Amino acid sequence: MTNQMPDAMFKSGETSASARPSTIARTTVRIPTPSGDDIEAWLYVPEGPRPYPAVVMAHGIGAIKAGGLAPFAERFCREGFAAVVFDYRQWGGSAGQPREELSFPRQREDYRTVIGWAAAHPYIDSRRVFAWGTSFSGMYIVDLAVSDSRLAGAIGQSPLVDGFAAARLGSPVKGLQLLAVALADRVGSIFGRPPRYLPGAGRPGELAVGTAEDALFGEKLMTPKDGTEWRNRVAARSLLSFTWRRPVRRAAAIRCPILLAVAEHDTMAPVDPAVRVTEKAPHGELYRFRGGHYDVYQGGRSFDDVLRVEVEFLLKHGSRDALRSSSLLPVRPAPSSGGENRNA
């Protein structure tokens, strides 16, 4: 498959689009949540006849939307897809306290809230909404592909799908140190103490969430280039929220087409569980790309290839013809080497 500005319609909670040096215009919106803490999101609306298919997007652990998601959203928009790119509550431009604390159920709920907001938008076709995630948010993508019947499809790149397997990547000593800090921080929260923070990325040997050899390369790519404030830190108590979660175990129950772009050599998100998801999912698709965990982002060696495959997936499953189709093609065998695509 080859791949080849919005009218603004403002609803309650939206703000007007600001001038910015980009070929694609975007609008900043505020999406209410039951907690009262609004979610900040960027809305990209393509040209052409409405309603549009849409992609709901969020970042991985410790990162914010200004840290590298715009190039993906802009490309999807050029291909005719609306994109809704959001920060989780307590992160980036979204409200919520304490800052930089990760809660798996809360962030998964944020995805659901934004999916619902997108499906209700008059410019968006509610039958063609996709969820997109990167790195840690692969956990949410797999979970939502199982549980959220509103989705037409899902995409995860460099996806973490097994928290327990990820916890075993580091040394046992480091794991115990992180656990001790996380438990102390959680106990402190009971008494109203502020979070104890860990660096999101650090050098090998440091006490940080990510200390693989390419972690600092990833930090560089995740640092916003537009001056948006971003702290390379995660509340230590956050580690207790996800290390035991294993969405990979639910892969056979995935409802919709799902594409996972998996690195040849990933030192942050275990590869084998991600491959198993695409093997067990009824309509799973696998793309193995060259390089490591962070090579999917702009500045990484496989950014162009991964983005091309993601666009092809969206066009295949997000077209009106795909919507009318009552059946899907069977899954093909997985490739044995990098840079290949297995399509459902």
Image (cartoon, rainbow, N blue to C red):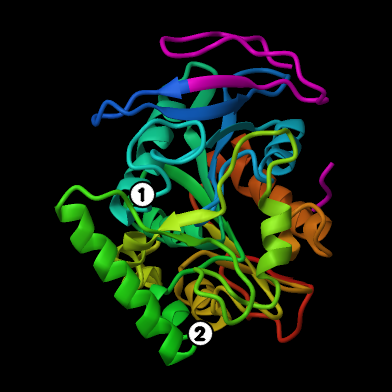
Residue type for callout 1: Arg
Magenta range is 1-29
Quarter of the view holding residue 31: top left
Q: Main secondary structure of the magenta part?
A: loop
- Left or right of 211 on screen, residue 182: left
Sequence-first tag of 1 and 2: 1
- Left or right of 174 on screen, residue 331: right
* Residue 155 visible within the image: yes
Circle 2 residue: 169
Between 91 and 325, the one lying in front of the other is 91
Residue type for callout 2: Leu
Q: Quadrant of the C terminus?
A: bottom right
Residue placed at 80% from the left, 61% from the top? 300
* Residue 255 visible within the image: no
List x then y, in percent, for residue 222: 67, 51
List x then y, in percent, for residue 270: 54, 79
Q: Is residue 22 magenta?
A: yes
Between 93 and 122, the one lying in front of the other is 93
Instruction: Provide the secondary structure element on which disc 1 rests.
Output: helix
Residue placed at 30% from the left, 76% from the top? 180
Q: Is residue 43 magenta?
A: no
Circle 1 residue: 108
